[in-house]
Image (cartoon, helix red, strand yellow):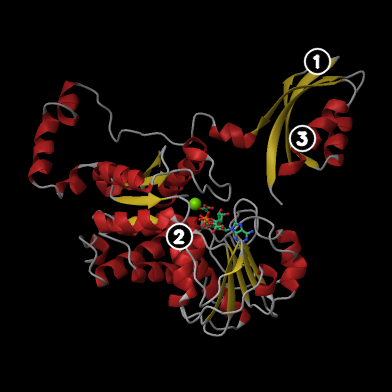
Amino acid sequence: MAFNSIIVRLELNHSLISFGDVAAAVSRAGGDIISIDVIRAGTDNSVRDITIQGAEDAESIIVTALKELPGINVVNVSDRTFLTHLGGKISIQPKMPIRNRDDLSRVYTPGVARVSMAIHESVDKAYSLTIKRNTVAVVTDGTAVLGLGDIGPHAAAPVMEGKAMLFKQLADVDAFPICLDTKDTEEIIRTIKLISPIFGGINLEDISSPRCFEIETRLAEELDIPVFHDDQHGTAIVVIAGLLNALKVTGKQMSNVRVVVNGIGAAGVSICKMLLAAGVRNLVPVDREGIIVRGQSYSHPMWQWLAEQPQVGNHPGSLQDAVVGADVFVGVSRGNVLSADDVKTMAPDRIVFAMANPHPEIDPEAALPIVRVFATGRSDYPNQINNVLVFPGLFRGMLDCRARTVNEPIKLAAARAIAAVVTSSELNEQYIIPSIFNEKVVENVRRAVIEAAILTGVSRRTPPDFR
Ligand SMILES: NC(=O)C1=CN([C@@H]2O[C@H](COP(=O)(O)OP(=O)(O)OC[C@H]3O[C@@H](n4cnc5c(N)ncnc54)[C@H](O)[C@@H]3O)[C@@H](O)[C@H]2O)C=CC1
Ligand SMILES: CC(=O)C(=O)O
Ligand SMILES: [Mg+2]
């Protein structure tokens, strides 16, 4: 269940109501008072800000319950999540102050001209003399934002700002959100190419499928900096990391499990590809219209590719048919598409990764008692399988070795590095994947990425700690 907190400013008429009545009403409506600030105290009346935590869907019930009490005036309700977003979540800071004319003539004209000419003569110097070496563009067109769908570039911005914050805090990468007002594949490709000189990498985010596949492939071919569609590969990498450890917990093997992947969009396609590369021999991809079947024809190029793979089953059916006897369910589709009864038809020691955001494919409270290993994409349950475990360390590594591109060995190395953060003595049903706050994650992923980039010949620099 998702929790949120609200701050409610109340004016209380003491002859009609006590604070105990307020607390009781909040509790009956499903909220917990977690703090109280007295704004104005008086003998006849007072004004207080109370911070209430409750289920996301209980907010209006709590506020209505308060408004119905006699002697109370609800002055204002503020949502703490919205307060966090006021004015946006990131800003750009200069690295040094400009204190006098001397500073000015070095950071700007005339001194800057010599630096510009040095880069003009040798463009590689952009890495050493500009922000390029540490800067990533987080680019979206707002068409597949989390599981919210096509909500447009303006509405996508808070998510992109959030990604930029995570880049900075976790890996000291300067990431800039770019929300494009176009859905045209060619226009997106051209725009990203045009803005690419200042960036050391491109993180594509929340661009819907199938356009995302062509956009990424073309940009990877046409640019000499890494282009990485986070929802495809970040998600696939973290799923493989989680699955490697979940299989250890259940004592099952990648080559023997039947894996259902629900939602064959950006994330689902890449997950299927990586599962096959990791040795899965029995894969059941499912989308809205049911199971994607080997031997059938599909207009979607990636579904067609899947239908040609020998590891993909040839039995048609619904999601409910697909999960019968399955060992693993990976959901990257939308919320609440699976019931507890469906999950009970899976094989014993079942593994369920219900990763749709913000609402998982199955209610965690319903799933937890009936599965062996359960994970979601969210931070309020154990085992958060989220691509945030990948992109900060992956880009840190790629920027540090100035990788030209991201390849399959780099992705697999990142998955193994994340899985390895959880030691065998720590590993259990509730802990198959490290927390994003585990400091080893970024460094392990960084090192694995650099090693793989050097070994596969796509690095352009050997970082000092690798010399
Ligand atoms: N936990 C994590 O790290 C991540 C989670 N996600 C979540 O996965 C979901 C999909 O994301 P993307 O692949 O980027 O979106 P997408 O739009 O590219 O793909 C979604 C796919 O799910 C299918 N789908 C929709 N309803 C379905 C249903 N009832 N049954 C089966 N398939 C259905 C769609 O037809 C589409 O093919 C979203 O909820 C997103 O938040 C995505 C990336 C990372
Ligand atoms: C986590 C993420 O990237 C998504 O849900 O789209
Ligand atoms: Mg995303």
- Residue 313, percent from left and from top: 56, 79
Q: Is residue 324 visible to us here?
A: yes
User: Which residue is drawn at the image coordinates 55% and 83% (left, top)?
Assistant: 253
Dot 1 crowding, Cα within 10 Å, few <14, some 14–19, many 20+: few
Could you say whether the residue bearing mark 1 is in a helix, strand or loop? loop
User: Which residue is drawn at the image coordinates 51% and 82% (left, top)?
Assistant: 281
- Residue 114, percent from left and from top: 9, 35
Q: Mark 2 points at which residue?
A: 232
Query: CB atoms at circles 3 and 1 under 8 Å apart?
Result: no
Up/down of 326 relative to 186, above or below: below
Could you say whether the residue bearing mark 2 is in a helix, strand or loop? helix
Q: Is residue 273 visible to us here?
A: no
Which residue is at the front of the view, 330 or 316? 316
Residue 78 horizontal side relative to residue 133, left or right = right
Dot 2 crowding, Cα within 10 Å, few <14, some 14–19, many 20+: many
Q: Name the residue under label 1.
A: 42
Which residue is at the front of the view, 149 or 428? 149
Q: Mark 3 points at which residue?
A: 60
- Residue 361, percent from left and from top: 66, 60
